Amino acid sequence: MHGVGASVTNALSEWLTVEIFRKHIYKMSFHSRFNARKKKFDSGIPDGPLEDTGVSTRRTGTLVRFKPDANVFSETDFDLETVEERLNQLAFLNKGLEIVLIDERISMADAKRRRGNLFASEEKAVDGAEKQENTQTEEQPFSQTASGQQSLFAQLDELALESESYRVVYKYDGGISDYVKSLNEGKRTLYSAPMYYKATKNDILVEFSIQHTSEYTESIFSFVNNIPTPEGGYHETGFKSGLVRALNEYARTNGFLKDKDANFLGDDFREGLTAVLSIKMTNVQFEGQTKTKLGNPEARPAVESVVMEGLNALMNARGFKKSFEEIIKKAQGAAKTRLAAKEATQAARAKNSIDNLTLIGKLASCSGRKPEFNEMFIVEGDSAGGTAKQARIRQFQSILPLRGKPLNVEKKRLNQILENEEIRTMISAIGAGIDPDFKLDKINYHKVIILSDADQDGMHIRCILLTFFFRYMRPLVNGGHVYIGMPPLYKVYKGDKVEYAYDDKELAEKIEKIGKGYQLQRYKGLGEMSAEQLWETTMNPATRNLIQVTIEDAAKAERMITTLMGDKVEGRKEFLAKYANFNKRDTFIDKLEKKEKKDGEK
């Protein structure tokens, strides 16, 4: 929610206190109280007027403390990772601003254990230099040798970390240029440093930073008054038009375009582009489905003017000639494939003709004609797809089996992507085209559910499909229409009593519920279930578990996709080293062996 200040926070809090430091310390507090006459809670009631404590201070600023009201929120714990990502983003957007996050719920040692000795962005705190951490974790006996003394000091460091609250400092002297560098980690950039420019036009402060990579998709992150605008708006439109105008002028002036040549298109210049655009303005108007689209028309000419002015200044500055030549070469390569991509895209959008070509024998369509009630299951494998077709309710559930693994779109150009039969089929079935012309109001299904096995291949297929949706149907994800189906991992049964468990914790609960003499089955794939079981556990809206795919932070999602699906192996290795536990024993085997031992003792 944007625009939330002290008033809204106060209204949603059990209590709120404010301390103002301005020569003296001033205090005021608020509480929610039960109103016996109205028989309801009144929120944000002042405990008294603003109090001048009379205490002198040289500090300046305001300290606000509050506790979320449990009568309003079902969950009142703050998610550390979410807070970290947002504060890190704010530090990028406000050059030189130092933000300190302290979480007294956990210690620095807890954070090290949780994150495999890797801290979040505090590695780049203050001056951007990485913090060196002691990686020794096993307790060692004290020795008089140098190494023994070192061991003792390491243990003392660990003890100190146990008593120290988790603390992170975010500060970026490079501002949004550092943001672009961060977004491009793991990508091959076409020039060494991001370009940056900042100026004010018509009382609108505009700053932007760009850097091109060898990738095939664009990544533009825009903000208004530090608020993310993933749906874009007039400022993004101005940025794109300023970019294409300035670069076309450069290409023509420097002989890359002859008199008879047509101009490059915006898509040509934005292929592989990573950009951060941040503007500051008054009287902001948000619109769009999730109120994350800038609706102020005056932002467009202001941003366009600053972008053209900035790029022209950089073109005439020393040291940038090679960078702009690389941009033009990249655009030339994109232009060569544009016609083929355009032809394939138009074919994919022509749903009526494509249905007869690519969907015959694949999509089992539902009979319902109301998209808000309809759902499409993208099912891994023909076998499971056949079972799902038997299990579905034909009135509102469609089934699209995937024959083989879809294409990893992160490594391909659009024309190559649209040559892939599985991708074309998905585009046709969803019926709303692809970005940048994806039409959310044209989708045939308000729920697109990925249903794959709970193994490594299934996880890979989920990653591939989510990458495609993120890159080419992002409004579908932003609108909350993409889901992950959660088939059970275990079946616990005794006689006619049957329970399904979706994780190890739930398995223990189901075993206790069934009681002694239970039988245990683990599902390795969707194909092992009967149609009745698949319906009851995974497809029945009344009993199934679905995970809605959301993008809280598009920049974080961008980095994750680059790491997991990009060309560089090193990033994936680091990710696996950080998060994968290769020493974890299969709990199913433990439970099975324990059960067999008990049965043998009877």
Image (cartoon, helix red, strand yellow):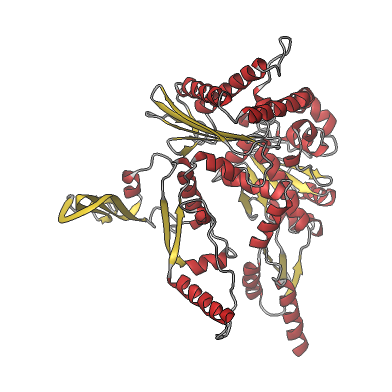
The location of residue 461, given as percent across then percent down, is: 75, 49
Query: Image point 73% across, 27% down: which residue?
Result: 334
Q: Residue furthest left?
A: 54
The location of residue 597, given as percent across then percent down, is: 75, 85
The location of residue 98, given as percent across then percent down, is: 41, 49
Q: Is residue 373 above or below residue 334?
A: below
Query: Image point 57% across, 21% down: which residue?
Result: 241
Q: Is residue 587 above or below residue 263?
A: below
Of residue 448 and residue 556, the one placed in the foreground of this image is 556
Q: Quadrant of the N terminus?
A: top left
The location of residue 63, given as percent across then percent down, is: 30, 53
Side of 484 where 555 appears, left or right: left
Of residue 55 and residue 359, the one placed in the foreground of this image is 55
Q: Residue furthest bottom?
A: 601
Side of 596 where 540 appears, left or right: left
Instruction: Confirm whether residue 393 shows in the render.
Output: no
